[in-house]
Amino acid sequence: MDSSYKDKKVITIGIVRDLTGLSERQIRYYEERKLIFPERTPGGSRKYSFSDVELLVEIANKIEDGVQTHEIRKEMIRAQKKQTQDEIRRKMIQGQLNAQFGLRKGPSA
Amino acid sequence: MDSSYKDKKVITIGIVRDLTGLSERQIRYYEERKLIFPERTPGGSRKYSFSDVELLVEIANKIEDGVQTHEIRKEMIRAQKKQTQDEIRRKMIQGQLNAQFGLRKGPSA
DNA sequence: TAAACTTGTAAGATTACCTTACATTGTTTT
DNA sequence: AAAACAATGTAAGGTAATCTTACAAGTTTA
């Protein structure tokens, strides 16, 4: 529900290289290892978001700490799974509240 | 003092074209008329920010209303001048308050 | 009407990006 | 230790994206 400019995929790989200090080779390799998922232009050029840039910096830090892409991927899946579960719980609680008290979407109106 | 991702110049002209619906010709022309100021890569490619994209949409709307770039530029300069004045006034008032009461930067600490 | 405004289009050149492949160095795994 | 894998560099050849300049054409302004 945030949906700012942060998640819009509009940055080409050259800019990402400059923003992160990583090589294009590295950026493409992390995609190959399924750590990052750029979109593509009709012509095939990669497009990244600012969120992607942030993620790449985190990845680079872990790599520097000796963590392998394989490990990083597992961590990411774990974190993503947890977040999904949290969202489900949150929605369930919201559902219970609505059922009990018939509340509206927000405190307004 | 905002300085989010919104003002970082990271978007190439093709993406701006897609985001705004304008032609590259138009985008470059509005630059020629000093309505927009992209940065450049070392190789010479233009780089725009999300703010630039928003501004281009506003420009496009005015153009559609029959306003000429010349007029739009005058409006922009006027608006910018006003904003500068507002900032000066705000700082002066802040200065007076600090002189009178010796307040800190924020309500924290 | 002449001049300026706005936009399209084309040409030719250059930059940016793509994929594939091979090499290297270090680290696991068998 | 040998083999396999991991991470990265680099090179080649090709395509996409962008750049500047110039001319055309319809519209608006002076």
Image (cartoon, coloured by chain):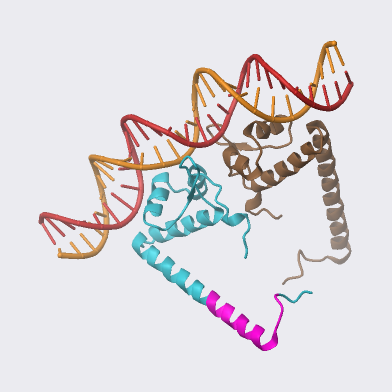
Chain colours: A cyan, B brown, C orange, D red
- Mark yes or no: residue A68 visible: no
Pick whichever, A83 or A41, lies toward us: A41
Taking B29 as reference, is B69 left or right?
A: right
Q: Is residue B33 magenta?
A: no
Residue A67 rendering spot, x and y as whole percentages: 36, 62
**Quadrant containing the C terminus of chain B in the rendered view:** bottom right
Residue B76 or residue B65, whichever sits in front = B65
Magenta portion: prevailing SS class: helix
Q: Which quadrant, please, contains the N terminus of chain B?
A: bottom right
Residue depicted at 73% across the width and 71% down the height: B108
- Confirm whether residue A3 shows in the render: yes
Q: Is residue C12 above or below residue D15?
A: above
Quarter occupied by residue B55:
top right
Above or below, B105 relative to B16: below
Q: Nearer the viewer, residue A93 or A56?
A: A93
What are the residue bounds of the magenta stretch?
A87-105
Foreground residue among B54 and A99:
A99
Q: In the figure, B69 relative to B1: above or below?
A: above
Q: Is residue B83 above or below residue A65?
A: above
